[in-house]
Amino acid sequence: MEITRYLLGFCAFFYIHRSDSAESSCKLKAKFNLSGYKNVEKKQVVVGGMFPVHKSIASTDGNTSRLPVSSGCEGFNFRTFRWTQTMLFAINEINKRDDLLPSTDLGYVIYDSCFTISKAVEGTLTYLTGQDEAVPNYRCGNGAPLAALVGAGGSDLSIATARILGLYHFPQVSYCSSCSALESKFQFPTFLRTIPNDKHQSTAMAQLVLHFGWTWVGTIAADDDYGKYGIKDFKEQVEEAGVCISFSETLPKVSSPLDIQRIVDTVVESTAKIIVVFSSDVDLGPLILELLRHNVTNRTWIASEAWVTSALINQPGVSSVLGGTLGFGLKRADIPDLQRHLLDLDPYADALTEEFWETLFNCTLDYGRAMTQAKQRAREVNSTLSRAARGPPVGLCSGRESLAQFNNTYSDVSQLRITYSVYKAVYAVAHALHNLEHCEDGLGPFKGSTCANITNFEPWQLMYYLKNVRFKVPNSEEVVYFEEGDVEGFYDIINWQVNGQGEISYITVGRYNGSADPGDRMTITNDSIVWNNEVLEPPRSVCSENCQPGTRKGIRQGEPVCCFDCIPCADGEISNTTDARECILCSRDDWSNDAHDACVPKIIEFLGFWEPLGITLIVISAFGALVTIAVGVLFAVHIGTPLVQANDAPLSFSLLFSLVVTFLSSIVFLGEPQHWSCMTSQVALALGFALCLSSIMGKSVLLMLRAQALKAARTRARAASKAAKAAAEAAANSGSPDVIVTNTYNHNDANVCANPEDDTISCAHQRAIAAGATLIQAIACTVWLSTLPPQPVKNTSAQNIKIILECDEGSVVFICCVFAYDILLALLAFIFAFIARKLEDNCSEAKSVTFGMLVFFIVWISFVPAYLSTRGKFMVAVQIFAILASSFGLLTCIFLPKCYVLLVKPEQNTEEMMRPRAKLRDGTSTGTSASLATAGTEIHSTIASTSIDD
């Protein structure tokens, strides 16, 4: 202890006398130029303070050829000067109280940090040393113990001072250093603050942005730890929630016109309407002035607590730019008698107050300086001071000016927020000292349950009481306590609204409590907010408008995720939410509506009975069946006539029956497909056509055989005729009257197959052919139905918006085989009929069959492309039309000539007219026995007459 005292005494002696002795080991390197307040005489404890009364340090020319000196400060700040006066007011108020530190009188040492780190460090070192000349690691002098430092202003300043104070375990209570980096007790073990941690504010700003649905915001931060950490926490939270940052700019600490202009250009060019600013008022001021000069409006600014109620920003004329600003302000409170203290200043008390007075009233308190300024002005106007005018010079302050006449930021106590935080910081130190002073011996918190002595305690001992202090703020219901050095994150949400005088008023429109449950932290009254340009609707700030239901977001390459295109959902896909990332595929039975925002059941389509088209087809089918039945009745009435007998009545009736089946089977294709209808329609059609075509084939076979027989008879008759003619000519040429040529033509040869009785196949054979061919088809259909029968299905792939109810054939192989067999029958019938096409009777049976089969083929050949080119119920309609057309074609071509004879020309209904006859090349007909006999008689007569004449 004696050695320490000796060293302190030696250093004090050295610094006072600045000895250049060779024996000295200490040398003064610099002397700090600090301004502030100091009152330590006869005080038991000294509380330190640090306030940025000035905005910056004065610029230097950077000349290193002469002895450097500590820079002075410039840019007096009335707002922070009010903070300084609040600390003085709080200490005076505490010293007057009987219930708080009644036996201890507090002193103070307050320095101006000039809003720069270097000045803050200078003040911290000087404060720790205890004298104007700083000596690191030493406390010089025997004055009152130092309690704590209230300060040092901005976060950058507090970080610098906290690192130094932490080395000595010296308590620091900050009133406006909110940077989240300061929460680290590893780096800043003795730092506490009465302002909420910026993590709360960053979260509050993020929730505000999300509350109003803003997804496209710009950010501006001061180039210090306060701005960088605050905006970093904000960006992390909003980006995690899907918000995109349009731009992120940094305000220079030393005002640079180029940098400010660049930021203005960025704000103007960006489409973001919301700009979040984490900055002090000092750093933000130059940007606001430039925005005003460029008249940058239609932006909504989100303010941090450092400038939301700053008069430095709220200058006349800023309403066009900053009107509608939303920000987070610290808890506000009224401090009784503070305004009286602010207005009751002695301008001659100290240099700092003197500068305040001169700056406020734009005058000087120095008479000599006032005279110098007056002379300078006189020289500028080329005049001299007259004797009459001599007296108090213009620009000299009287010292009796009234502060009350000015309504500026210094005397305005309507928004005491950081001022209130200063007040709480001083009281926190006072309550900690009070608890230290009133510690009971034997119950103390230190080793051996000892207590500290209020007149001689160590900083770390007071730190214990500060960490655990808990007190109620005077004239308030707020209880202050520290949790890991931080207080509760409580903010007022403030809206800048223009009042009737054109001035901006701070209106509280909500609250934020960081200690509440996440869902209950922020309460805000949207209707109370007046936005930029005095509109009541919240502005929209999005890079791309929301994608409405029915669309999805398509990300633009190389752009933030908030910038996207709205791509309509494809057919069959929907999105039923806003900003859907993907479209949802509808189920097989559903399809998207026109808006693509809902899946609706697909239209069930089938050709119904009661549709106009269905009714038309039913009528045509029924008409065809009735006509066919009518033909059958007509044949039954005339069953004994030669025409009906010549056409084999049973075979004709089977043909008519098959046509009735085909006509009626087309009706089964109508209506909603069922198991029975699918099987019945296909099988009935296959069997109906098989019976029809096999019956026609049976008729065609007979006609072909008759045609072949008549062709052979005609050939033999022609040969006999030529022989007879040759004999007659020979006899005539010989001149012999005894030669008599007789007709050697065989009438029996000419009558081969001339009569039905002489046909090589009988009617029984025709019926057997028809029955056998039909039986084969019946067997095939039976196998088809028993293995893979047709069944109804929902066709969802043919048309997107429709479900087509149709019949699945079951087996493509079977249905191809079945209908290929019908085609084979039709082809054989056509071939046989075509061969017999020249065989004539009264009804031209062979020609009728040939034309009927041609119609059949034309219809079904046309059916294939028509069927393949249609969809849905029209496929069924095309199929029914083909069935009806082919059926009507066969009915008309085969039975119309017969009906004509039966009804119109009954005189032709004779056996002779029904006999088949071949048509000669010259148009004459031969082949009947009567015609052949007549030809033979004529030849015989000619030969005989020739002989007689000779």
Image (cartoon, grey):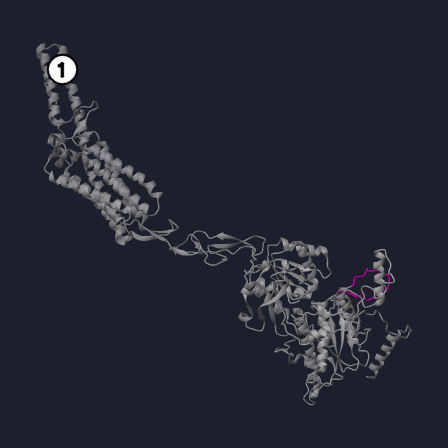
Taking depth in this image into account, of 291 and 437 the one nearest to the observer is: 291
Looking at the rendered structure, the kind of residue marked 1 is Ala
Q: Residue furthest front?
A: 388
Q: Position of residue 705 (x, y in %)?
A: 19, 33
Numbered disc total: 1
Looking at the rendering, the stretch of residues picked out in magenta corresponds to 58-75
Residue 189 seen in this snapshot: no
User: Which of the 4 image quarters holds residue 877?
Assistant: top left
**769 left or right, relative to 277:** left
Residue pictured at 84% horizontal, 56% vertical? 380
Q: Position of residue 521 (x, y in %)?
A: 56, 70
The quarter of the picture where the N terminus appears is bottom right
The quarter of the picture where the C terminus appears is top left
Q: Residues within 10 Å of mark 1 (few under 14, many from 20)?
A: many
Residue 546 seen in this snapshot: yes
Type of secondary structure dominating the magenta stretch: loop
Taking depth in this image into account, of 148 and 443 the one nearest to the observer is: 148
Location of residue 597 with respect to 486 vertically, above or below: above
Location of residue 43 with respect to 709 vertically, above or below: below
User: What residue did someone put label 1 on?
Assistant: 728
Q: Residue furthest right?
A: 21
Q: Position of residue 697 (x, y in %)?
A: 21, 38
- Is 290 inside the magenta-drawn segment? no
